[in-house]
């Protein structure tokens, strides 16, 4: 069935674009006797910063290498051999009309005086899909410059083989790569409509020199997800069989506090070493997939054989980059698995030190909690029978920028009014709550001591899963509605 313009509106609504997000169309078209034929296009919805620069600038913001041949302006049209390559920054309403016209009539309308009218016969999407440049799927060939993973819909079209000329390869490939579109006679054409990930994604992966550690660089928007809410999953394969798998909750790492609030973090994790295939996935705390790779090899060495002919003399030169390692034996593989298991055990044991804050350790429990609360989202809800007993309790919110609601029963008001802080008292003997929780949209944490006891005993800081946090918030809402605005 042919999709309609109303279908496009529904699909964009499904993606849930936010009010300040924009759309970027990247497209490649081939001019024939009857006008421009659209070969491939990505319609990507994302943060406004994506439209303030070209793809090079966007990749630079994510710590990525730039592609030298891209035009400087965010919106441009350029020619590469027989192909016309376009990047257009526009709003979501305009892109909805452009794509709606294309899917319904087979002909689009031009945009911004640079995008030509194009023709395409597109198929209806079959399902919402997760897209990552780290995969090798039809959809992944549309998003390589977007860096982030995405959720979207793929409108398939005929193979580009009918217009693809093998002689184009060297002349047009660089221009296509700068827009993130991979084109070839073995790849399907069409349009990808997608919204970029706004929480976290995989930037790059590389091995350490000794091949015993894999460095996983993760990009994230700290205002939307805390590093402690991320989970890495790593599988390692030999000869088509899985030999080791490990999940790493980043909250369990000793370096989690040092990584908090940064837009790019590098997580080094133990791995089995040489000549291993790996697969890496990134999840949030609730188990939702944020990004994934395919099974991949890490290039360990490059060997080049050079033959130089001078007159009637032939000389050969061998150049090696990296280390030419031998295939590990069965015993070496088994030893490597034990080494990795022990390394993870040591890593997680060290991470416990960041969960337990012990008096005399040089780390203040109040400071540790305040740092975590700085990543709270929406409204920060605090449930603590004794909160406010000490004036220092209110310092926990010094780094918090969102509204705070404090529910207590035996605590005191802040020494002076703070606009962002609202306090209520729930009377009763005893009050219906005894546990201490700090709750926000999609998360929260609990501690086993009240703030006025932080200096005298070990304090356990525990993050809450989403479902547990929501249950706490249900209780909070009921208690808050019946609480008094006066002590």
Image: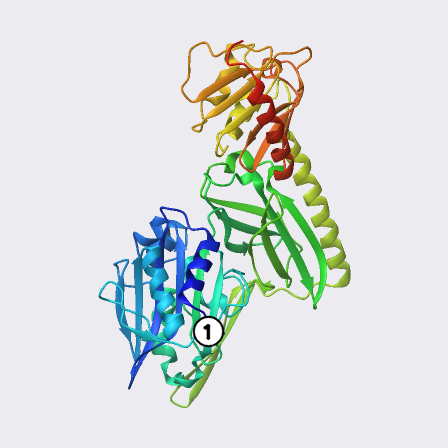
Q: Nearer the viewer, residue 482 or 406?
A: 482
Q: Residue at x 30, y 62 (%)?
A: 88
Reply above or below: 278 against 32.
Answer: above
Q: x, y percentage for residue 402? A: 44, 29
Left or right, 91 with respect to 421, comes to: left
- For mark 1, what is the residue? 2
Left or right, 328 with respect to 191, comes to: right
Q: Nearer the viewer, residue 369 or 256?
A: 369
Q: x, y percentage for residue 95? A: 34, 61
Reply above or below: 399 against 338.
Answer: above
Residue 359 falls in image quadrant: top right
Q: Nearer the viewer, residue 267 or 372?
A: 372
Reply above or below: 101 against 266.
Answer: below
SS for dot 1:
loop
Q: Residue at x 61, y 31 (%)?
A: 474
Inspect this view and state whether residue 15 appears: yes
Q: x, y percentage for residue 63? A: 41, 51
Q: x, y percentage for residue 96? A: 37, 61
Residue 173 falls in image quadrant: bottom left
Left or right, 305 with respect to 454, comes to: left
């Amino acid at each position: 069935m042919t999709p309609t313009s109303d279908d496009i509106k529904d699909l964009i609504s499904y993606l849930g674009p936010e009010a300040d997000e924009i759309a970027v169309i990247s497209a490649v078209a081939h001019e024939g006797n009857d006008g421009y034929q659209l070969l491939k296009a990505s319609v990507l919805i994302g943060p406004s910063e994506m439209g303030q620069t070209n793809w090079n600038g966007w990749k630079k913001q994510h710590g990525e290498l730039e592609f030298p041949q891209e035009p400087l302006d965010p919106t441009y049209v350029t020619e590469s051999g027989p192909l016309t390559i376009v990047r257009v920054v526009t709003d979501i309403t305009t892109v909805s009309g452009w794509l709606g016209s294309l899917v319904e009539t087979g002909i689009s309308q031009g945009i911004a005086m640079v995008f030509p009218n194009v023709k395409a016969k597109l198929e209806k999407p079959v399902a919402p899909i997760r897209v990552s440049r780290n995969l090798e799927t039809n959809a992944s060939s549309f998003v390589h410059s977007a860096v982030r993973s995405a959720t979207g819909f793929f409108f398939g079209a005929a193979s580009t083989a009918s217009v693809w000329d093998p002689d184009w390869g060297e002349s047009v490939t660089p221009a296509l790569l700068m827009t993130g579109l991979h084109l070839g006679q073995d790849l399907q054409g069409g349009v990808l409509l997608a919204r970029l990930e706004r929480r976290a994604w995989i930037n790059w992966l590389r091995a350490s020199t000794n091949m015993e550690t894999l460095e996983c660089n993760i990009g994230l928007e700290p205002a939307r997800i805390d590093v402690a809410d991320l989970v890495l999953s790593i599988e390692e394969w030999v000869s088509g069989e899985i030999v080791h798998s490990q999940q790493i909750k980043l909250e369990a790492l000793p370096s989690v506090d040092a990584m908090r609030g940064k837009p790019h973090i590098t997580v080094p994790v133990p791995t089995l070493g040489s000549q291993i295939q790996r697969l890496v996935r990134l999840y949030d705390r609730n188990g939702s997939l944020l990004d994934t790779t395919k099974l991949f090899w890490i290039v360990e060495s490059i060997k080049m054989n050079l033959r130089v002919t001078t007159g009637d003399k032939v000389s050969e030169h061998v150049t090696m980059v990296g280390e030419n390692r031998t295939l590990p034996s069965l015993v070496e593989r088994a030893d490597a698995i034990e080494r990795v298991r022990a390394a993870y055990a040591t890593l997680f044991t060290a991470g416990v030190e960041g969960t337990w804050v012990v008096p005399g350790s040089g780390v203040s429990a109040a400071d540790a909690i305040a740092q975590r609360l700085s990543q709270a989202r929406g409204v920060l809800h605090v449930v603590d029978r004794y909160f406010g007993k000490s004036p220092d309790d209110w310092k926990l919110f010094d780094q918090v920028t969102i509204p705070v609601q404090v529910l207590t029963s035996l605590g005191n008001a802040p020494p002076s009014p703070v606009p962002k802080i609202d306090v209520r008292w729930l009377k009763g003997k005893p009050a219906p709550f005894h546990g201490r929780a700090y709750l926000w949209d999609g998360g929260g944490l609990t501690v086993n001591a009240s703030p006025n006891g932080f200096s005298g005993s070990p304090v356990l800081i525990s993050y809450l899963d989403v479902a547990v946090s929501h249950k706490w918030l249900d209780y909070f809402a009921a208690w808050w509605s019946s609480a008094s605005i006066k002590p």
